Image (cartoon, coloured by chain):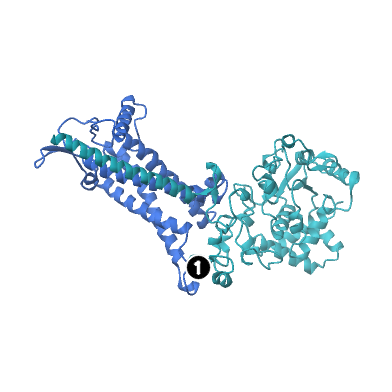
Chain colours: A blue, B cyan
Amino acid sequence: MTTKPNAEHLEPAVYVYEAPLRLWHWINALSVTVLALTGWFIASPLPTMPGEAIDNYLMGYIRFAHFAAAYIFAVGFLFRIYWAFVGNHHARQIFLPSIFNKEWWCGVLHELKWYLFLTKEPRKYLGHNPMATLAMHLMLVWGTVFLIITGFALYGEGTGMGSWQYTLFSSWVIPLFGQSQDVHTWHHLGMWYIVIFAIIHIYVAIREDIMSRQSMISTMISGWRMFKDVRDTEDKR
Amino acid sequence: MIETFYDVMRRQGITRRSFLKYCSLTAAAMGLGPSFAPKIAYAMETKPRIPVLWLHGLECTCCSESFIRSAHPLAKDVILSMISLDYDSLIMAAAGHQAESIIDEIIEKYKGNYILACEGNPGLDQDKTGGMSCIVGGKPFTDQLLRVAKDAKAIISWGSCASWGCVQAAKPNPTGATPIHKVPGIGNAPIIKVPGCPPIAEVMTGVVTYMLTFDRLPTLDRQGRPLMFYSQRIHDKCYRRSHFDAGQFVEKFDDEAARKGYCLYKMGCKGPTTYNACSTIRWNGGLSFPIQAGHPCIGCSEDGFWDKGSFYDRMTSIDHFGIEANADQVGIAATAAVGVGVAAHAAASAVKRAQQKGDQEQ
């Protein structure tokens, strides 16, 4: 592991998030924001536009933004999976939580205690702490998979039978849920799932940046994890 | 010697010219292109007609009502006269044992070579309510259905009742109304679903004509519906689509936008989620269809459309939570709860941090 002494703080810093992963994080954050906003206005459209239909294309533009952001979201996620293979071991973390490791579950429990103010000090991690890993795996990874699959199923309805979106997604997803209206409803619920994740994610990132023993927000910008003390981390490798 | 379609038509006084017109119209309706019109004509001139047994289960006869109002008079005359020759308890002249004996006769004579057209569905949970319903000729309809289905060449599930269950299968489904493809022991005959409440008349005659003339089933989608009529949504070909793309919506019935004929999306139109041909073929001889009449599509050809909440809500309710709520109500409630939790947690964290700082200073 690359380490460099931090002259100002006399703390070690570790390079955790590589540039492509950081880029993905921020592009993903942006695309999720666009998707949630445009998705909301697709389900609950804005007030009627005045004038002739030929002079307006508001709903068309909103839907275009949704579809464009959705492609970025989906391609970004595929890239993220690819990066889990070729990136450093931190890039694999959210895909493979160590659910068969008893020690890891103890870590989850300890982190829970930390959030319930039952313990004085959080443990120190290079990568994600076990509870963060679990939340990202269950909410972000599977939420994303669910939204991409249901999203392409709905998109395939528009591109029509015979299109690859219809063949790959709509043809089996829609009968699975019952009918198209159900897929719309569940896709919409999926949006709220990710919104809830985002709220918790942002809150916890800010809180941990202040209260934990390592840097959070600056790490996702620079890639370097900095520490507030010199003791060993739990996940040192 | 069995009569061909053409023989039947000529016997009814239909000219050859009218017959060829009908063939062209049917080819166009099925999306087959002009070269198929002579093929349909040839098939109808040469092929012996296949007997159709039209059964009625739990239903409202709206499918039959639709069918006999087929826009092109020929379609009605030709197909209806041919199949009514066999069995259709609603419109046949025969009654009682004579009528019921036709079923036995057809099954025996054309074993594995007749078509079962089923309108409505059987109620399988008769015991639950302690009563009996849907008795045909003194026996439960289920018995008649299973007996006819056993040796049928193919089964046509007419309408949403036979295809999905429709209103009698809506919650709480007291009689256990079950769509044809889910009836235990229905056999291996291929099932063609022609959903709609009712299906469009031209769709019904189109499906029958295709099967009788080409002697094969129309291409079906994964849910068993003929692709030629159910491959697109109402929304895809809706004449009000330009108002949807423009963002021009009816906000309430009889507002200015409604008078101008804007998109009914906000009024709960299910056009974007409904696979049917209403916006292309339309109804009553191409006169109109619900959206053209200013009413949102209720999605009558979709599975379980009765149980998806209000016909007038764009976002329909989810009943999995035991309460009436749509995706936004659930989502906003959950997000608000998480937001309040986060705020409370942040406040508690700030207090704790202040305490710790206080401890350190002491």
Q: Quadrant of the C terminus of chain A?
A: top left
Nearest the eye: A220 or B37: A220
Question: Which residue does the numbered mark 1 point to in the structure image?
Answer: B248
| Residue at x-position 33% and y-position 38% | A94
Nearest the eye: B212 or B331: B331
**Quarter assignment of residue B295:** bottom right
**Residue B118 at what x, y percent from top left?**
74, 47
Q: Label 1 is placed on what type of residue?
A: Gln
**Residue B96 at what x, y percent from top left?**
89, 45
Give the class, few, some or many, for how many residues have Cα within 10 Å of label 1's Cα (few <14, many ≥20): many
Q: Is residue B304 above or below residue A122?
A: below
In screen coordinates, is A228 left or right of B260? left
Q: Quadrant of the N terminus of chain A?
A: top left
Nearest the eye: A129 or B118: A129
| Residue at x-position 31% and y-position 31% | A113
| Residue at x-position 33% and y-position 43% | B344
Residue B16 can be seen, yes or no: yes
Q: Residue furthest front?
A: B362
Q: Residue furthest left?
A: A7
**Residue A50 at what x, y percent from top left?**
47, 73
**Residue B229 at what x, y percent from top left?**
64, 57
Residue A148 can be seen, yes or no: no
On what subunit does the disc labeled 1 rest?
A: B
In screen coordinates, is A147 left or right of B361? right
Q: Give the secondary structure at mark 1.
A: loop
Nearest the eye: B113 or A27: A27
| Residue at x-position 16% and y-position 30% | A231
- Number of numbered discs overlaid on the protein picture: 1
